[in-house]
Amino acid sequence: MKSWNKTQIENHKIAGKKLALIKDEFHSHILSNVRMKKEITEKECVDFIKKSYKKHGLVNDHKKEFAIVAFGPNTKEVHHFISTTTTHHLKPNTLILLDIWARLDQQNAPYADATFMFYVGKKVPEKIQKTWEVLISARDSAIGYIKKEIKKGKFPRGLDIDRVTHDTIGKAGLGNGIKHTIGHSLGFDSPHGKLPGINWREYSPILPNVGYTIEPGIYLENFGMRSEIDFYIDDQKRCIITTPVQKDIEIIQ
């Protein structure tokens, strides 16, 4: 099991910063279309993301799927990939899920991988807001647990990190909405790395100087949501988060 070197870590951090810029550009793109009352589809948004990758010097090794953009009820799908013929139009008062993953266009460049939530409308509906609060509590509990264990001199196991998030969501009565594991290592030819991940089957501890995701999701009957951040443990045993930590669902109006 090999840790990343300093160049690889720096390349990952740069990719994470570029994903943050693309997220902001996506927000502005949706806002512009909403204000001009211009029709916009999930496919058009994915095409926008592909162009943004290129603009920022990023690549995505998937031959077909470059991002996940899901409108409204499509957010309840864990991986809502669209085909070239699929057309889902954006409507007012709609929840949006954006999942983007890419790496620098060079060798020794690991992926960055992040997911964000948006709402087109004046105010996030109460049920969506309450679900979001549970979700970010689960995400932050996982990071808090990792930091606590590292402070004790321990590298936590994947299954223990997974359990923390599941317990948080389960105590809120939303356990049936859990459809996937809590995270994974990051790779060089895919966002999903080959090193031990963060899931209920993983007895191995996370490794120092390797990128991982924390990405709890809750998927209900009419909508779903996910918050995904990247992190690694550095030589000083600090938990370094390398992508934006979303606190609130971003309002677009």
Image: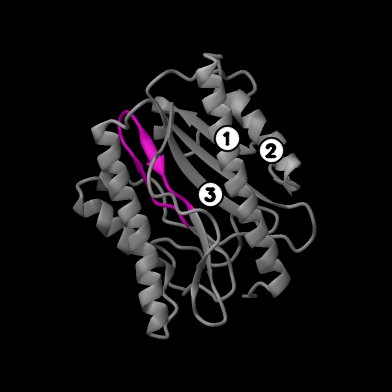
Q: Amino acid at mark 3?
A: Ala
The kind of residue on which mark 2 rests is: Ser
Other-residue count near label 3 (Cα within 10 Å), few / some / many at <14 / 14–19 / ≥20: many
Do the residues bearing badges 3 and 2 touch, measured as CB atoms within 8 Å?
Answer: no
Q: Residue at x 65, y 50 (%)?
A: 18
Of marks 1 and 3, the one in the foreground: 1
Q: Indicate the secondary structure of the residue bearing disc 3.
A: strand
Which numbered tag is attached to residue 170? Answer: none
Q: Is residue 7 left or right of residue 224?
A: right
Q: CA distance from mark 3 to mark 2?
A: 15 Å
Q: In the image, which residues are magenta?
A: 214-228
- Tell me which residue sits at (71%, 39%) in the image: 63
Does the stretch in magenta take in 224? yes
Label placed on residue 114: 3
As drawn, is 165 to the left or to the right of 253? left
Q: Position of residue 40 (x, y in %)?
A: 56, 19
Looking at the image, do the residues carrying marks 1 and 3 touch, with CB atoms under 8 Å apart? no
Of 1 and 113, the residue lying toward us: 113
Looking at the rendered image, the quarter that the C terminus falls into is top left
Disc 2 to disc 1: CB gap under 8 Å: yes
- Circle 1: residue type: Phe
Q: Does label 3 or label 2 sit earlier along the sequence?
A: 2
Up-down relation of residue 135 to residue 49 (above or below) = below
Q: Where does label 2 land, which residue?
A: 52
* Magenta residue check for 43: no
Residue 191 shows in the view:
no
Q: Residue at 56% across / 76% down in the picture?
A: 234
Label located before the other in sequence (2 or 1): 1
Q: Secondary structure at mark 1?
A: helix
In front here: 195 or 29? 29
Q: Secondary structure at mark 2?
A: helix
Q: Position of residue 48 (x, y in %)?
A: 65, 30
